[in-house]
Image (cartoon, helix red, strand yellow):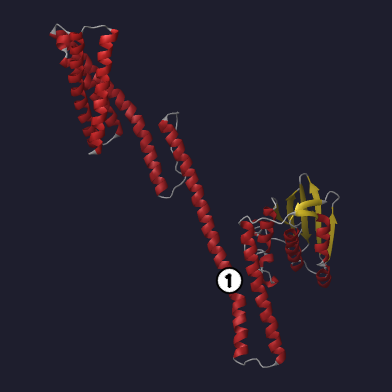
Amino acid sequence: MSDWVRLLGIAVLALLGALAVGVLGAALVLHEPAATTRLIAEYILISGALSLAVGGLGTVLGTRLFPTLSLKIALAYAVASFGAIITILYTPLLMFKEPGDLHLLVLMLVCFMVISVGLALLLGRGVARSVASLRAAAREIASGNFSARVSAPGSDELSELGTAFNRMSEQLGEAFERERRMETARRDLVAAISHDLRTPLASLRAMLEALQDGVVHDPDTVATYQIRMHAQIDRLSRLVDDLFDLSRLESGAPLTLMTVNLGELIEDTTAGFHPAADRAGVTLGTEIGPGVGTCELDPAQIQRVLVNLIDNALHHTPSGGSICVSAGRAGGSISIDVTDSGTGLREEDVPHVFDRFYRGEPSRSQETGGTGLGLALSRAIAQAHGGDIRAERGTPHGARFVVNLPL
């Protein structure tokens, strides 16, 4: 009902506008007498009302009955031309003295209507083709194909709509891909955490049950069980702490920045590993370049990166091997290298060594006693400082980890 009211309102406004233009034009511009002005007003009211009624009815019925957009546009042209014919047929006495002249004019108007309908079909075909392309692409996206695109030549509204549609499709595809990666990462993380929790918990349960059931009586064995239980609890505590710190860093938690002499930080951190390196028969040294001085960083977090990398290198460097921790300045950044002559990295593992709980690369093995988060934490710390970290295969063997920090 509201559509009919709106159409009626538009028709009344159009009729009143035509009446105002006709009366003012006749009286003020053409200076017609009052009788002629009244006749013109009557002509406009009657012919205009008839044309609007026929045109409105045809438009409403056509939009509901005609199945395609091109036919609806052709109908609009036909209705407009038909309205012109009605107007001429109503005023033969005012404009023509001879009936033949009227017939000729009506014939010409009918020819014009045919041409208009043909032009409308051509225009409607192009518009309908663009709409059909949009419809087909929308169906592709609805089925999950976010690579669907529409051709958007030109600069009209339909072209802008096609461009906006393509941009929407691209953004939807990117959002879907991000969601898929996040869901995959979430499942992998849950599975990895479950795996890392299951082993120490199972060990703790077995030892506790042995103690509770009285299976173990010997004081030395009980002490051994207690030491092992403490080690498993310590492992669980480190896992929880690492998970918490990783989540905090990835969520953008602020760092505690201060001015630090990076060379001294590297020397002090490396010195703490000399006893372990001596016991393992591994040579551990440092090389601090002349350009390395003070810089703004979080010393506790950078030291944590160094500890992770050096400890990782020690676990996989055999006796007689060597580990070198070096630092140097390159342009607007400082590079920290931890290079070892150990077992090295496999080519297929290099892109994944910084993934959480990645098990393919040897440094992720649970045999080292680590939580499987050390390298992931190192990457998060480097990125939080605005830098990055990468892993490389050594030549001819071994591994090299490079941390770049902006000055």
Residue found at x 36% / y 34%: 129
219 or 338, nearer to the observer: 219
* One can see residue 1 in this view: yes
Residue type beneath disc 1: His
| Lateral position of residue 257 relative to residue 158, left or right | right
* Residue 227 in the image, given as x and y percentages of width and height: 70, 82
Residue 158 picture location, percent across and down: 40, 32
**Residue at image mark 1:** 195
Vertical placement of residue 125 versus 295, above or below: above
Q: Position of residue 115 (x, y in %)?
A: 27, 20
Find the residue positioned furthest to the right: 290
**Which quadrant of the figure contains the N terminus?**
top left
Residue closer to the observer: 205 or 93: 93
In the image, farthest residue toward the left = 99
Residue 134: x and y, percent?
39, 39
Residue 151 in sight in this render: no
In the foreground, 46 or 85: 46
Name the element at disc 1.
helix
Position of 66 compared to 345: left or right? left
For the point 48% across and 40% down, the residue is 167
- Where is residue 15, by image quadrant? top left
Q: Quadrant of residue 208?
A: bottom right
Q: Is residue 57 left or right of residue 267?
A: left
